[in-house]
Image (cartoon, helix red, strand yellow):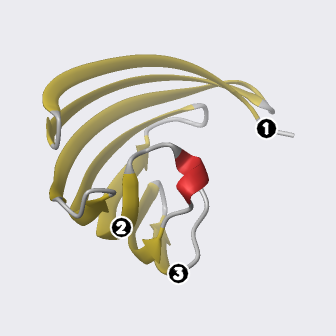
Amino acid sequence: MHFDGDTYNLHLTYVDGPWVIGGEYVNAEAPLSKLTGAGFKKIDVSAFSLFANYSYSEKNSVTVRFSDIGGDAVEDNDAKTDIDVKKYTFAHNSALSDDLALILEYSVQDGYTNNSDIFAVELLYAF
């Protein structure tokens, strides 16, 4: 997707012992390139995410996160599509080695096109 507009991002994190607490805010307003094929010619959205991560051992932690995206998109035929998505996530993170982690994640998504439960197993390699 190609943006020819403005995007603003603010990210804050606070660390206290085993706790990491943070939030992020993003605002994007832009005409979209015709090359996207998405059928939208303009998008104006705001999103935020709040999370808390608790490390209960040297190799394991749990994270809870809430995300919200809201705004609208203007389609090629000038019809407006409202975007309103809320997502609640719970994840368990296990360090398998210094550079490899296993993440089990469960999310509930509410809005936009459907409501869904999502379960993910992720293997994360950091280099």
Q: Earlier in the sequence, mark 3 or mark 1?
A: 3
| Point 27% across, 54% down: residue | 67
Q: CA distance from mark 3 to mark 1?
A: 32 Å
Secondary structure type for disc 3: loop
In this rendering, position of residue 124 left or right of residue 109: right
Q: Amino acid at mark 3?
A: Gly
User: Residue 91 or 46: which is nearer the viewer?
Assistant: 46
Choose mark 2 or mark 1, whichever is in front.
Answer: 2
For this rendering, which residue is in front, 5 or 104? 5
Q: Tell me the crowding category of disc 2: few under 14, some 14 to 19, or many 20 or more residues within 10 angstroms, Cα based.
A: many
Real-space Cα separation, disc 3 to disc 2, in angstroms: 9 Å
The residue under the point 22% across, 43% down is: 87
- Residue to which mark 2 is pinned: 43
Which residue is found at the position 22% from the left and 65% from the top? 72
Q: Earlier in the sequence, mark 2 or mark 1?
A: 2
Q: Which mark is residue 5?
A: 3
Instruction: Find the residue positioned furthest to the right.
Output: 127
Q: Earlier in the sequence, mark 3 or mark 2?
A: 3
The relative height of residue 42 versus residue 38 in the rendered view (above or below) is below
**Mark 1, residue position:** 126
Q: Position of residue 62 (x, y in %)?
A: 39, 37
The number of numbered discs placed on residues in the rendered structure image is 3
Residue 91 to residue 119: above or below:
below
Q: Residue placed at 87% from the left, 40% from the top? A: 127
